[in-house]
Image: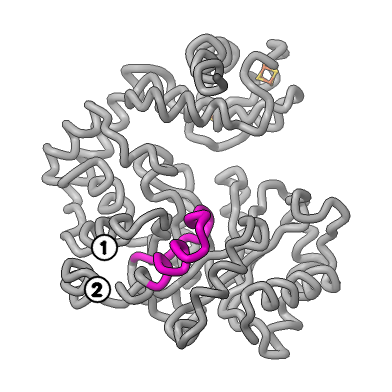
Amino acid sequence: MSPAAQRVRAALPLHPFGRRSGLDVPRVNMGGMRLPADLDEAVSLLRYAIDSGLRYIDCSRGYGECEWVVGRALKGGYRRKVILSTKWAPWITKIQPADNPSADRVRHRIDESMRRLDVDYLDFYQIWNITHRNEYDAAVARGGFLDGVLKAKKEGLVRHIGFTAHAPAADLLEYIDEADWCEVLLVSYNMLNQSYAPALEAAHRKGIGTLVMNPVGGGRLAEASPALLKLAREVGAKSVADLAVRYVLSNPNVDTILCGLHKRSDVDETLKSAARKPFTPAQKTRIDGFLADLLRAKSGFCTACKYCMPCPQGIDIPAVMSLIYDDRCWGFRDFARARYAGLRTAKADACVQCGKCEKACTQHLKIIQEMRYAHRNLRAAKKAAGH
Ligand code: SF4
Ligand code: SF4
């Protein structure tokens, strides 16, 4: 461990992980979604993060070889130093198209994840990626996903249960209200997308541990944006990434964040930001005001509420809107274009101008016009990236 990491670790306090779990965690933990492809490099990085004081590891059956790699990193006494979590979703059919949300099927997946991780119990097992009401209902139905996890819990294979969501914000509030079994909630939340702030508040109030992914907006907040650099300087942040991490950790409803692991400096820099003072209410008001003014001045403001979905043409409208803002408002042009090229859903030019989304949009946005903007301005990079 570097001297810098040792210094930071000494100042790394534990924080209650919601009342229901009874656990404590540091405010920075490990995301296993994009580990280095090289096994030795990934194992070394995971151990570096654990040695630096990070504890909770977020894995998934659907993150490629993540479970297998984490299992290798946890040899040699590392297993007992971590809170190990994995998850699965029967509706993410890339794992197995014939999957279903039954108790038997989830048990099969729990056993399989434990074999891949080479462990004899999981600290957390989560229902992964609830997006629609029918998925939540299927998961909690008698003989379904939740029953399977509860049975595994009784048998000592799983210690805690939770779920992750990309659902409309209002729906998520309903699930939080109903899910008296839930001990941890994992959602995306950052300076540029705060649609789940009410969900984090509701979960925190109920004693559910709150865990945030994408605190630096999937990496885009680590890039230099002139507007955000100006804001960072104004509130005394060291960089845009420092601004982003401290902004999320300044929310008292966020228990902890996941740090994406690509290189050692990700761990060091995130820990340094977490060790700095949270923003004061006055600084937070300044940041919120700055962001709102900028968004209002440059375009309408998509809150990612998802009421416009599904688009009959298969366009992920909130995702495209978010990339438009990255390009137009924040100046993250290369990032936006690369992400647009990588979208697995239909591109904006699939829009047939049916108007369904505009009728449903809570912010009365001109979505059809925005799809044209995306096609004109983001598509060029697709060609460039595809050379
Ligand atoms: S107007 Fe375009 S983007 Fe909106 S729902 Fe119809 S096809 Fe989808
Ligand atoms: S485009 Fe409108 S309805 Fe769709 S997510 Fe954004 S704000 Fe919500």
Residue 33 in the magenta stretch? The answer is yes
Q: Residue at x 51, y 12 (%)?
A: 373
Q: Position of residue 255 (x, y in %)?
A: 38, 66
Q: Position of residue 347 (x, y in %)?
A: 64, 22
Q: Is residue 25 above or below residue 217?
A: below
Give the number of the disc on residue 271.
Answer: 1
> Position of 98 compared to 29: left or right?
right
Looking at the image, do the residues carrying marks 2 and 1 touch, with CB atoms under 8 Å apart?
A: yes
- Closest to the observer: 118 or 306? 118
Residue 121 in the magenta stretch? The answer is no
Q: Quadrant of the N terminus?
A: bottom left
Q: Position of residue 343 (x, y in %)?
A: 60, 31
Q: Which image quarter: residue 25? A: bottom left
Q: Residue at x 55, y 37 (%)?
A: 305
Q: Check disc 2 and give the amino acid type.
A: Leu
- Closest to the observer: 208 or 315? 315
